[in-house]
Image (cartoon, rainbow, N blue to C red):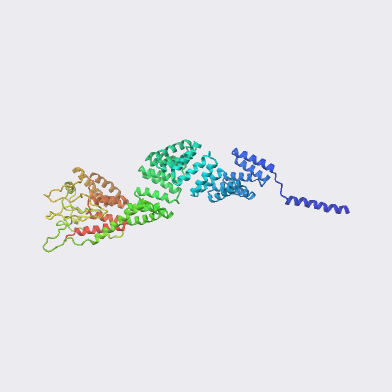
Amino acid sequence: MRLARVILPLAALTTLSVFFTARGAEPKPDRKKSQAALERAVREDEAGRRQAAIAAYTEALQADPSNVAALRARGNDYQAAGDTAKALADFEQAVKLQPGDAQSYVARADFFLAGKQYEHAVHDYDTAIGLGLHRTEIYNSRGTAYSAMGEYRKAIDDFTEAIKLRLDKPEPYKNRGMARAALFNHRDAIEDFDLAISRKPDFEEAYVERALSNAGLGEYQKSLLDLNSALKLKTDDVRAWRVRGAVKERLADYEGALEDFTQAIRLDPADPRLYLARGSIYVRLDRVPESLIDRNRAVELDPKNSQVYVARGSSYHLLGQHDKGLADRTTAINLDPNDALAWEARGNAYYMLDRYDQAVADLERALKLAPDNQEIAGLLASARTKVNERIAAARAVENAPETTAILLPNLPAVPTPPDAQTPKGAAPPAPPAAVAEVNPPKPAVPASPAKSSAQPSARDARRAAVVAALNPPKSAAHVTPEAPPTEPAPAPRSAPPAPPAPAPPSAPSPSAAPSAPSPAGSQPQPPPAGSQPQPAASDDALAKAAELHTRGRELLAQEKFAEAIKVLSEAIKLDPELTLAYNARGFAYLKLKRYTLAMADFNKALRQNPMYINAYTNRSALRKLLGDATGSASDRARARTLARTDTPQ
């Protein structure tokens, strides 16, 4: 019994001892097994079998969890496989296990560099160098991080140190050249690229970088040669195709540039920059609809980038779709209010549309953001000049006397200009104020212009005779608003004509304007000295132009504006001095919201006849629609003045 009492407690103690040993004791590392697994994993990596390598590294770590070489290697494989969380965990564990191991800091720094966490990368490279690890690769990598941070001088110092450690390595030369190029030191950069290529003649990236620096110096032919070499070495380098396309554009080889950008898009159809680049070439080749297609694609790919809207807005403006163009540039400003180019682009568009007040506001903002931009400064100065001219014109109209005949003692009356007199028996023309005062003003249906000269040219007299033969004048009572009245010829006058009132700055007077037929027996005036006479059109051409003009106005009355434009364009082709047709076609363009073409036609009509009331009224309406309140008011005031001048005193 006593023996049994002793044996039982001993057995219990033995059981407990085995249990606690199994639960609490750490397994002894098997370093030999771990090293064998590590070597096997390295061979798997070399054979390109990453998953098998990861499994072998894991086996090595199970045998010896302190094997930091296996942790670093497995972390690299995890990173290559895209599993960044596991990769970082392995690098962190390696640093934790051996905080004095510089190579673990380098491994983690390389991870941060690849992930664009440049400040963390620099910190770990600093630690590794501080622990005494001085290698070309470390300085080169830290220099790369500094370059990415924009600290190019520090980067150049690191690349120089890397070169000192290994003069035969081409990579630090190439990287130092890139840092120097970023500081616009292209000549020193080219020397570095030369050294890189001398150490590695098939260094394709160095050829591309040297091409960029040559382009920076304006040496486009040298740049082109380097890019040709680069593409022979690597035919699928999208960047090389893109850069060569840009160089060809500078060399005015637009077809060649188009081919290169198209090839780049084939290789990388998701890069919006390529569509913007090709879109610019389409514009240069006057293939604007295709440029719009490319720029639409750029917007789809990068809708948060203000520059794609600036570019697409340009295509819209070139196609006459100004509302869309302005909307795109406004979107660009909303996306990036600090983008000087967006403000400049919209200001430029306003200037093009004669909306000078708005142009000044946008260009002032652009210049504030880019104070050294001389192009913006020049356009702003021009816009301010236009605004001042309009203000001066408006003041001149306001200060003009209301009377046109002044009686002084013992002196004859200053004659009313012949153009302002109304022929006997004709009703005084109604002033256009009622049309102009509508807000926004409605364009007036084109009517016959007030003539600016009592002595017409032979060409004008012949044209008027042909038109009169085809369209006998109606009485004022039979004229409808859609059918412009035909003006009778003015009666002969004995007094010499006074010069016509000057036109506003936006509508300069031509050397000769169309006029009414002269009275019987009068002789046509010779053209002004130095003027180039227009080739005389045949009577048949004038007659056909008159017929087409009449047909065009009928189409306007029927609101068939597109058809009217075609007919009126044919009339203008036959008779380029048919002022009435320009005004009528401008009215049609206005109704179709093709404002740039409408403005061009109204301006042309007013250049040919600065006394054309109806054209001023129409242009006033157009400017009001475009937001140019100053220009609209100036044209409206001019129309009123001419209407008052047309009224007998």
Closer-to-camera residue (224/475): 224
Quadrant where the N terminus is found in the figure: bottom right
Position above or below: 383 against 54: below
Whether residue 558 is visible: no
Instruction: Name the residue at 33% across, 53% down.
Output: 351
Question: In x, y percent, where is residue 577?
Answer: 22, 47
Question: In x, y percent, where is residue 482?
Answer: 25, 54
Whether residue 10 is visible: yes
Instruction: Name the residue at 44% across, 38% down.
Output: 226
Closer-to-camera residue (173/568): 173
Closer-to-camera residue (411/423): 411
Q: Is residue 419 left or right of residue 445?
A: left
Question: In x, y percent, where is residue 247?
Answer: 41, 41
Q: Is residue 279 left or right of residue 117?
A: left
**Total tally of numbered discs in the picture:** 0
Q: Is residue 16 left or right of residue 264?
A: right
